[in-house]
Amino acid sequence: MKLAERFWLFKKKTMLYRPEKFGRIIFLFLGFLAYLLISVSSISAQNISGVINSYAQVLDLDTCTNQLLVNDSKGFFAGDRVLLIEMKGAIIDVTNSPNFGTVTDYARAGNYEFGDVAQVQGLVITLKDRIVRKYDIGVGSVQIVKVPRYSDPIVIDTLKAKPWDGFVGGIVVFEASGTVTLTGDINVTGDGFSGGRNSRNGSATANQTKLFYPAQSDSAANKGESIAAVNLSFGAGRGASSNGGGGGDGQNSGGGVSTYIRIHGIVRNAGTAGTIQLKWAQNVAGGAGNSTILRQDSYIKATRVN
């Protein structure tokens, strides 16, 4: 083949280089890249505040299929990052001795792991990867928490948890790349385990000293909640239950039992609460021990005199 014919074949099979067209391609590519970077930066720095997590109680789980049965799947979607955690389940000493409330076995309390959601169907959430830890569903108050992911987040106001309700809540968790800027607080004060719940006691017996009584007892106030799954038979009394505070016994204490109260200020009975009856310690007109009754929508003002 002649040299000229070889050159013609080479030109036909080879893309010709055109500087002006190549420049336009580079310019368009750089323009697209700049637009992409601007778009990403505009959504990466996110302002966050309030409650950012979604929560669900885990009713059952299957480690073979990585599936969780939850009480409510709203707020969970495929691709979500999640935290699986057991809130309670520790075993404590329940003898009426100084050892009461000491943790003898943490069991599976505090077990947790992160995972990613593969699928949500009804109340069943399937995770992409195998569930590694063990969980006690019936005792341990296991919950799943959605973990939002941010790039360069700015906490502009108080970041808080959904208050713990005995089944879910009490946790703030998120993942972040870049810088986390705090112009507001991350504050979960009062959002965790509950303190001793109010109880309406009947006639109290004085000089109570035991470390535990049944919950709602007339002899002592209720204990605070803790990582221990405590039987209601041990739900009141001064003994602390692992990391939960004890309740006061009915013996000159600050617990929930008292026979006498000293009033200062205004006592009001409103709504449909019924009536309140006050008995005065000193003699009043009509004889000693007379009662003053506060009827619905009335009030009495008491002023300290000593």
Image: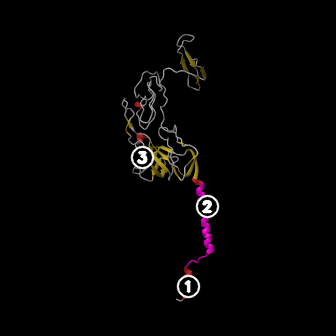
Q: What is the three-letter code of the residue carrying label 3?
A: Leu
- Residue count near mark 3 (Cα–Cα under 10 Å), binned few <14, some 14–19, many ≥20: some
- Residue count near mark 2 (Cα–Cα under 10 Å), binned few <14, some 14–19, many ≥20: few
Mark 1 vs 3, N-terminal side = 1
Check whether the beta carbons of the residues at disc 1 and disc 2 lie within 8 A of each other.
Answer: no
Tell me the quarter of the picture where residue 4 sits: bottom right
* Residue 110 against residue 42 in the figure, above or below: above
The answer to whether residue 158 of the structure is visible from this angle is no
Where residue 303 sits: x, y (%)? 59, 19
Q: Is residue 28 magenta?
A: yes
Main SS, magenta region, reads helix
Q: What is the three-letter code of the residue carrying label 1?
A: Phe
Give the residue displayed 55% in from the left and 79% down from the top.
Answer: 14
Name the residue beneath numbered marker 2. 35
Where residue 243 sits: x, y (%)? 43, 36
Q: Secondary structure at mark 1?
A: helix
Comparing labels 3 and 2, the label whose residue is closer to the camera: 2
Check whether the beta carbons of the residues at disc 3 and disc 2 lie within 8 A of each other.
Answer: no
Give the residue displayed 62% in from the left and 73% down from the top.
Answer: 21
Where residue 219 sits: x, y (%)? 43, 24
- The residue lying toward the viewer, choosing from 175 and 51, is 175
Name the residue beneath numbered marker 3. 61
Residue 225, label in figure: none
